[in-house]
Image (spheres, rainbow, N blue to C red):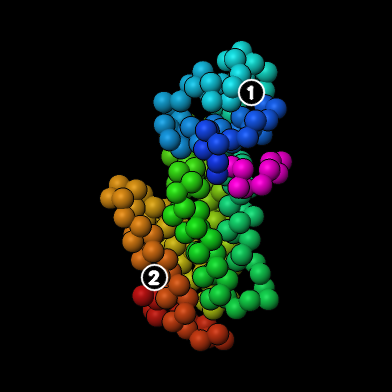
Amino acid sequence: MINAPFSYFCLSNNTMPKQKVDEQHIIIQSLILFRQRSFHSTSMSDIAKVCGILKGSLYHYFKSKEELMEKVIRYVHHYFKQEVFAKAYEENLPANVRFKNMLKASEKIFFDESTGKMYGNMGVESALVIPEFNPIIREFFQDFFNAIKHIYAEKYAEDIANELAERSVAEVEGSIMMSRIFNDKSYIKNTHKRLLSRLEKTTANTKVNEESIA
């Protein structure tokens, strides 16, 4: 499991402290390159170069670019699970506060100059065209869905919470894509406002039926 402090991940290649190259360092550098250039446009030679090692040495850690990409996706999943999704389960806080904290945490990732370059749309859009990555990408979105459903379920009946969670994940991913295409953060902000409003429209103890959903 990767356990370096996140401030370390945000450093540019020019400011990266000298360190012994290991699997963790390679995964972090690969994440940045895949995000900047896409999976298909990044070669193992590119990765070896930014890591300061020979291409042959890279295969000592990963037998293929596909294996490396899998580790990158799992790292991204782990980071979101800890820093974003976990906020949905802080039961000492009201549902709307937990949801707001979750949305703020995701905005911090996407809007920050350094982290946003690493994590836009998980930073693995191009990997979706490779079937072998689909199961682990689905794990990410399942956890995303579960976190949102857990919050909505406090105010909505289970079937409605399920529907709202599905819709919310789709809306968030769509807003991230639109914000990148038009270089406009308001797509994400406005989507988050709608999601929160959808939750806050009911009282703390009211269960609503499907007809009352906007």
**Residue for badge 2:** 194
Q: CA distance from mark 2 to mark 1?
A: 43 Å
* Tag of residue 136: none
Of the image marks 2 and 1, the number of the one nearer the N terminus? 1
Check the image and report above or below for 94 versus 169.
Answer: below
User: What amino acid is labelled 2 in the image?
Assistant: Arg
Check the image and report above or below for 76 versus 161.
Answer: above
Image quadrant containing the C terminus: bottom left
What range is drawn magenta here?
1-9
Residue at 67% in and 23% down: 61
Secondary structure of the residue carrying tag 1 is loop
Check the image and report above or below for 184 versus 94.
Answer: above
**Left or right for 211, reference 76:** left
The answer, for residue 153, to whether it is visible in the render is: no
Image quadrant containing the N terminus: top right
Q: Residues within 10 Å of mark 1 (few under 14, many from 20)?
A: some
The answer, for residue 120, to whether it is visible in the render is: yes
Q: Position of residue 212 (x, y in %)?
A: 40, 80
**Left or right for 9, reference 180:** right
Q: Position of residue 66 (x, y in %)?
A: 55, 26
The reply to whether the magenta stretch includes residue 22 is no
Q: Quadrant of residue 155?
A: bottom right
Residue at 42% in and 76% down: 197
Q: Residue furthest top?
A: 56
